[in-house]
Amino acid sequence: MTCPVTGAATGAAVPLSGPRFATEPAQLYREMRRDHGSVAPVLLDGGVPAWLVLGYRELHQVTGDPMLFSRDSELWNQWPNIPADWPLLPMIGHKQPSILYTVGERHTRRAAMIAHALEAVDPFELKAYAEQFADELIDTFCGKGVTDIIADYAMLLPVRVLARIYGFADEQGPGLVTAMNDMIDGRERALAGQQHLASSMFALLADKHVRPGQDVASYMLETQLAEDGSGFTDEEIAQDLMVMMAAGHQPTADWIGNSLRLMLTDDRFAASLFGGRHSVAEAMNEVLWEDTPTQTVAGRWASRDTQLGGRRINSGDLLLLGLGAANADPQVRTDGSALTGGNSAHFAFGHGEHRCPFPAQEVAEVIARTGIEVLLDRLPDLDLAVPATDLTRRPSPWLRGLTDLPVRFTPTPTSAFGDSR
């Protein structure tokens, strides 16, 4: 039996699932590169075929040529074989209204609107918000001497800060945290979480039409009004705000968790636990290369027959962007120097016109770095409460993060939201 897209034996394709994506992804990517080269045939849920781009140069080529490798999911040649209840439809759907699947000039204008809104966020205020919410969260467990950094901190902090800069009232923050984490949970609560997030975004925009403020939602509406009737609808702006919150929350939470895991398990970063700020930045950069939160992105679709990495790619084939695999490509990682000097040539934020906007990257970095620094300031003797070998990760090929990070520390009194630091 052959794959209807690749023409290769389906037995040769690698299922994009299983525990190895959590336990040993680097080894798995090496085996795939050895067996298939820089572009490997894979099978998604239900045996749906696709290509996983493993090579750094090949990924650069795909993301740098939006005409040949389009973001338009309508091109997919597998739509006739996709059932209505396919679990990946929320990720790869028909005619999705968000910026993720907009192409051409409208995508360029939409990306500019988002970048403008995020650039207008005052960086000093952003850091102050991150410090405030970090302190509030730490105050809930600092007197106990033990906590789970993932559940009690990392998975709560980013969305609270994002909600504030988007224009939500602080009392709406906890509900948005619950909705976001229910969506990530992916089970029966996911739909309710998605509905809460959508209704909250539409209500926010309705309020900002009447009472605009110095916030991301208001800045986006200003751009809408400036287009003289040819701008974006409230539905489009709400969809983009939801995408921005989802993309800003989980990867940033995983960036915090993965960086703290590295700092608590690697002696090179021990100084950070005693206030060494430079090491915090180095740990965060190393994570983006070696342990990047966003491992695989779907996707791109070939607009015509072509060749990539020695493979024949047919028109309408789906290509998955192997960001984590490309970062580890031995063709560009011959001496490990990529990790030094703050080298940012990694694919952690993507590449090309559909990459994560630079202002969004800066927002994520401020939230993650501030979250780590405040935690280490408040709990300077933070240490793992379990052996490093007992730490587990979500078994996902898409996002790489810890399921928990148990720690212990000397109990400390609560702060007056920063006054004690």
Image (cartoon, helix red, strand yellow):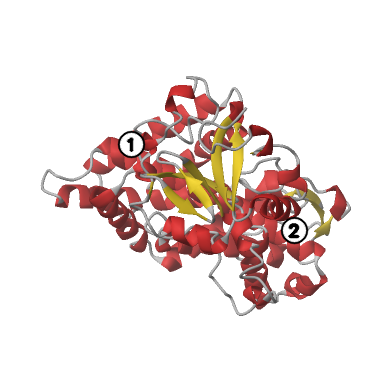
> Which quarter of the figure is the C terminus placed in?
bottom right
Amino acid bearing label 1 = Pro
Amino acid bearing label 2 = Arg
Observer-nearest of 339 and 386 = 339
Which residue occupies 68% across, 34% down? 11
Q: Residues within 10 Å of mark 1 (few under 14, many from 20)?
A: some
The secondary element bearing badge 2 is classed as: helix
Of marks 1 and 2, which one's residue comes earlier in the chain?
1
Q: Which residue is mark 2?
A: 261
Viewer can see residue 160 = no
The secondary element bearing badge 1 is classed as: loop
The residue at the far bottom in this view is: 341
271 vs 43: above or below: below
191 vs 374: above or below: above
Viewer can see residue 66 = yes
Which residue occupies 76% across, 67% down? 380
In the picture, measured across the screen, residue 169 lies left or right of residue 154, that is left
In the picture, measured across the screen, residue 400 lies left or right of residue 251, that is right
Q: Which residue is mark 1?
A: 97
- Could you say which disc has been placed on residue 316 in the image? none
Q: Position of residue 279 (x, y in %)?
A: 68, 74
Which mark lies nearer to you, 1 or 2?
Answer: 1
Observer-nearest of 191 and 33 = 33
Q: Residues within 10 Å of mark 2 (few under 14, many from 20)?
A: many
> Which quarter of the figure is the N terminus placed in?
top right
120 vs 222: above or below: below
Q: Quadrant of residue 259?
A: bottom right
186 vs 157: above or below: above
Q: Quadrant of residue 336?
A: bottom right
Observer-nearest of 250 and 45 = 45
